[in-house]
Amino acid sequence: MDLSCGQGLLGQVEGRTAQVVADWLLARPPQWRDQVRYVVIDMCTIFKSAIERVLPHAQLVVDHFHLVQLANATVTEVRRRVTVQVRGRRGRKGNREWELRNRLTRSAARMHAEHVDDLEAELAALPARIGAPILAAWNAKEDLLDLLALTRTDPNRERVAELLYRFYRRCAHADLPELARLATTVQTWWPQILALRFLRSRARGSWMSALPRTATSSRGNSFASRHASRGRRRWERLAREV
């Protein structure tokens, strides 16, 4: 998809392999490929591999929509897991954490302050084994959204580092495998996530979006929950190094 000159959809191909993507790009004239400066993708290593091979000069950028989607999915995953562990079944009407499921995936920035306070109070009123992990996951999700929102403000390096540190620290202290995977994904794709900040302010050339119809998470980048204590130390160290 060409996002710079109103050309819309450039092409669509069958398959989801690096070779299919590379073949489509190689079918374009060299002059066309040379003009592509930025390529926006989701967190899919297949696309990353193809773009780096065929368009080595282009800057890869991760679309923030898919990061927000992944963060919300992480909160949902935590909520479902702790509900099953404590209640012995899936959530349903009458379980307050289930009834709050839509509010948990809503951005706090789009909520009135009193509604945010009410949400936190409702989670605190739940059994600790349910409410505490969900609240930790929700706070980590909001930390990540605050970090991504900096894209629209042209922040300095110190402000980016401050919010990135807060996000990593939250994930480290929560000691939840779902947040460990989310933090690992952010770390793995951080150069491409950060690139959108510069793209917003500098891009004047050709953009090309290689976003698929469905999001792909970086499953291969997660670390095992059985190494939780070692993982916490790792994230605390990473947070200090930001």
Image (cartoon, grey):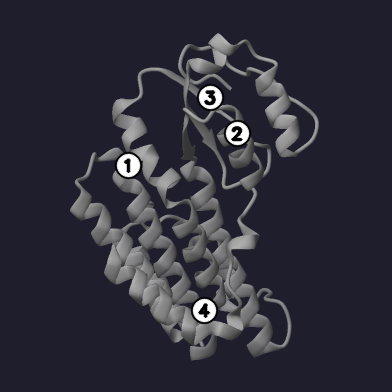
Identify the residue position indicated by label 3 in the image: 208
Which of discs 2 and 3 lies nearer the camera? The answer is 2
- At 49% from the left and 56% from the top, the residue drawn is 188
- Residue 216 image point, x, y percent: 65, 49
Badge 3 or badge 1: first in the primary sequence = 1
Quadrant assignment for the N terminus = top right
> Could you classify mark 1 by the number of other residues whose Cα lies within 10 Å: few (under 14), some (14-19), or many (20 or more)?
many
Q: Nearer the viewer, residue 214 or 115?
A: 214
Between the C-alphas of marks 4 and 2, the distance is: 36 Å
Is residue 98 visible from the viewing direction of this image? no
Is residue 216 visible from the viewing direction of this image? yes
Question: Which amino acid, by three-letter code, is at mark 1?
Answer: Thr
Rendered view: 16 above or below 224: above
Q: Is 121 left, or right, of 126 in this rendering? A: left
Q: Nearer the viewer, residue 59 or 98?
A: 59
Which of discs 2 and 1 lies nearer the camera? The answer is 2
Tag on residue 53? 2
> Could you classify mark 2 by the number of other residues whose Cα lies within 10 Å: few (under 14), some (14-19), or many (20 or more)?
few
Badge 2 or badge 3: first in the primary sequence = 2
Which of discs 3 and 1 lies nearer the camera? The answer is 3
Q: Given contact means CB atoms under 8 Å apart, are the residues at marks 4 and 2 in contact?
A: no
- At 69% from the left and 74% from the top, the residue drawn is 92
Rendered view: 156 above or below 71: above
Quadrant assignment for the C terminus = bottom left
Identify the residue position indicated by label 4 in the image: 176
Question: Which amino acid, by three-letter code, is at mark 4?
Answer: Leu
Q: Given contact means CB atoms under 8 Å apart, are the residues at marks 4 and 1 in contact?
A: no
Identify the residue position indicated by label 1 in the image: 151
Question: Which amino acid, by three-letter code, is at mark 3?
Answer: Met
- Residue 5 image point, x, y percent: 47, 11
Which type of secondary structure does the marked residue at label 4 adopt?
loop
